[in-house]
Amino acid sequence: MRPLAGAAMLIVAITLTLAGLLAWSYHGTIAREQTNLRNLAEAFAAQTHYATLALDLALARATERAPENGTIAAMPGGAIEDIPARVRRLGPDASLPPAPDGAPRIGINLPARAGDPATITLTRSLPDGSSAVIETDAAYFQRIFDSADLGRGGSVTLHQRNGTMLVRSPTLPNVIGHSFIHTPLFQTHLPRAPVGAFEATSPIDGVRRLYGYSAVAGYPLVIVTGRDLSDTLAVWRGWLWVAIVAWALLSATIALLAWRTSRETVRLARRFRYLKAILDSLATPLWVLDEARRIVLFNRAFLQFTGRGEDAVTGRFEADVLDPAGADARADLYARSTADGVRALEAEIRDGTGATRTVIQLAARLTSEGDAAQIVNSFTDITERKQVELRLAYLADHDPLTGLPNLNRLRRVLADALTDAAVCGGQVVLLLIALERQQEVADLLGHEAGDDAVREVAARLAALAPAPLCIARVKANEFGLVLPAGPAHRPADAVALELYALLSEPVRVGGREFHLAPVIGIALYPQDAGSANELMRLADIAKHRARSEAGEPVHFHSESTHIQLNERLTIEEQLRHALERNELVPHYQPKVDIATGRVTGFEVLLRWNSPVLGAVSPARFIPIAEQTGLIVPIGTWVLRTACAQASRWAREHGIATRIAVNLSIRQFYQKDLLQVIAGALADADLTPDALELEITESIAMSRVDVVERLLGGIRDLGVELSIDDFGTGYSSLAYLKRFPVQRLKIDRAFVRDLGRDADSAAIVRSVVALGHGLQMRIVAEGVETESQLEMLRSLGCDEFQGYLFARPMEAGVVPALLRRASNA
């Protein structure tokens, strides 16, 4: 029975080793294939980048020559010699979606007929407002991808960043142009990293595949390489069957040998040598210990691992052969395996060359001849896998670009610092630093240059002395610092100003100097907050305040900041329900002809009396409505209400007057603005010439081509137009003559100083002359005194409005006002 026990021991050892090798081989096969697919995706991304860059350069050169249409000739140096392409110009009226970060727009034109080729388009906006597009046959990219042999079911695809498939090899015409934005690639993996690999089920045929992907540098494109999981594992499955057969044969052989050895003891030595040869064929180190921990059996892989010969191993104590540093851990492993069976130990051990390897040691109890206990052991080398795990652990707490701690690490350090401060009564300062102009470097010189600028800032912060508790990169262009505070440390404001001065110094990137415009938000513990999350929130608020406060790039959180934020949010919350609760009321301020004293019309001014907040000034709630988009439904309601009121005055009182309504910039970019205006007039049965729309200079100059088109559409409806607050903005007089405007309204800031400031009178005189020269009427706002009115009359102003004649009033008061004015 002793030979059978030895055979059982070997079978167990071989089974454990084989199972471990197969599992390692399986995961290694998947990992290698994912690495190959990722590398292939990066290679194709590089080719696609250069091909797209060549098209981009060709487009730029073609537009410099200003062709109307045509095919690009071969470029010097062979840049795009084999790419048939065609350049077209699009007029300024072409509707094109905006491109992020200044990148070109890339799309696909699907063939109108089956069999015709699809074309890839690359479009860039030109300084004159038009656009230029270059088209090339998608087959060019197809030929690039056809060079990859990914086996049955393998594919290479080119997608836009919005998920649209542009090219696929092998081609599937029925899916070209479809969006795959909801797949794991675009929902999970690509937002996390521009390059990577993953396993997923194909959305096209439901087959499980391995994928690699890589974003194309500088362009909104993504390369995806895929291979069937079953195809990837085909070789591994072959080895699996080989291993199973080998294991079965080996087990049968060992069993047969043991059986024969029990009958033929004279042949024991030869059998032993045969068994040793089998063990030597295994790549995993194997060795067997007796009760005294002497090595009684081993294979060639064990000798290679220890770097020793057979004579230096046979019969020696294990502690004399293996790294003695792990002797205690191995002794504990053997004790546990002797009592309970198979056990495992992960440890670091030096091999025969002195290199440290990370291994998993499996130990199993066996009973040898004479019922003596023995331990069979095997090593599985996991050094590479461990290095990957350590790298992942490092990346979990560090920023790979700068090597600084990341946001996760900053939060933990901050929480620990607050805990220590709470115990000893200390203070902690959190600074959040944003580089406002870092993106300009990337936009001008590329993302790598932007990264160089970030690394330069990180190096400056890392050199601070004394070193902060933590310096972290928390966002793409933001850093966080945790500092101790209190009497024993430098004041927080001094540190913040020193940081601002340090980071305000220019950085050199690409041979040029850039100023990154740092802003710093600061919050203190325990003065501002008692928890890490709250301190982070308040420092972030302070940072945004630093952005918005002109001339104040360093901002401490204060209670007033919190109060202002709370007030703003309260106004926003109540304003969202103001329409449905009928809390908004239009008031009407008369416009008066200066020469005749006749009322020429009314401007609609909105008032809000909230049951929660009381009377809220328009100066407080209108900017919030603009920021939140609530101005769009509110503006539509005001327009419809004003038109209905003007129509009601005409029907019930015989008052035919013009009503003026202000348009905000958010309303001006409504897609259905013209339909809204026409609908308001039609529903109120009001003639278009009874409506006047007022826009500010900022609206007029925001997007001149769009504004000119919309203003023309409004005039085509028959509605009159005026520019409000003229003289306070930045409008170009060259554009002013292009707009179909009937009135200019002089801002109250110039009217207020008439008679006291010669400059104001000169400005008003110039505006009057300018407006009259362009056949426009001039309206003065905010007239409150007779002297101001006389000055306006002498300067040739046509109309005025202000408290001198009447304050804004509710609709019911207007008829009586007009009757008094007509009798006067």
Image (spheres, rainbow, N blue to C red):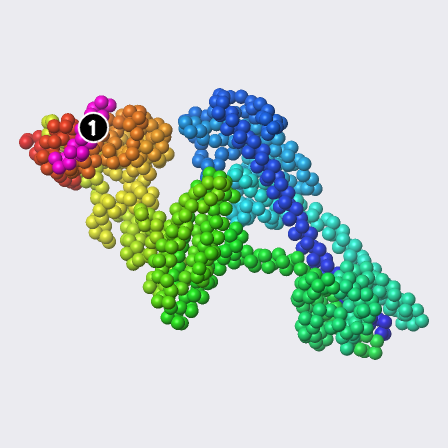
Q: Residue at x 67, y 60 (%)?
A: 382
Q: Is residue 76 magenta?
A: no
Residue 557 coordinates in the image, percent (x, y): 33, 57
Q: Secondary structure at mark 1?
A: helix
| Residue 233 position (above or below residue 174) | below
| Residue 612 position (above or below residue 95) | below
Q: Residue at x 74, y 52 (%)?
A: 237
- Note whether residue 671 is visible: yes
Tally the numbered discs.
1
Based on the displayed image, in which of its 4 quarters is residue 792 positioned? top left
Residue 151 falls left or right of residue 561? right
The secondary structure making up most of the magenta span is helix
| Residue 371 position (above or below residue 698) | below
Q: Is residue 772 magenta?
A: yes
Residue 60 falls left or right of residue 242? left
Residue 506 falls left or right of residue 319? left
- Note whether residue 813 is visible: no
Q: Residue at x 49, y 57 (%)?
A: 405
The residue stretch that appears in magenta: 754-778
Residue 541 coordinates in the image, percent (x, y): 36, 54
Q: Residue at x 64, y 43 (%)?
A: 40
Based on the displayed image, in which of its 4 quarters is residue 361 positioned? bottom right
Amino acid identity at mark 1: Ser
Q: Observer-nearest residue: 629 or 396? A: 396
Q: Count neighbours of disc 1 (C-alpha within 10 A) and say few if under 14, some if 14 to 19, many if 20 or more.
A: few
User: Image quadrant for the N terminus?
Assistant: bottom right
Residue 676 coordinates in the image, percent (x, y): 32, 33
Residue 495 coordinates in the image, percent (x, y): 37, 58
Q: Observer-nearest residue: 291 or 1? A: 291
Residue topped by disc 1: 766
User: Image quadrant for the C terminus?
Assistant: top left
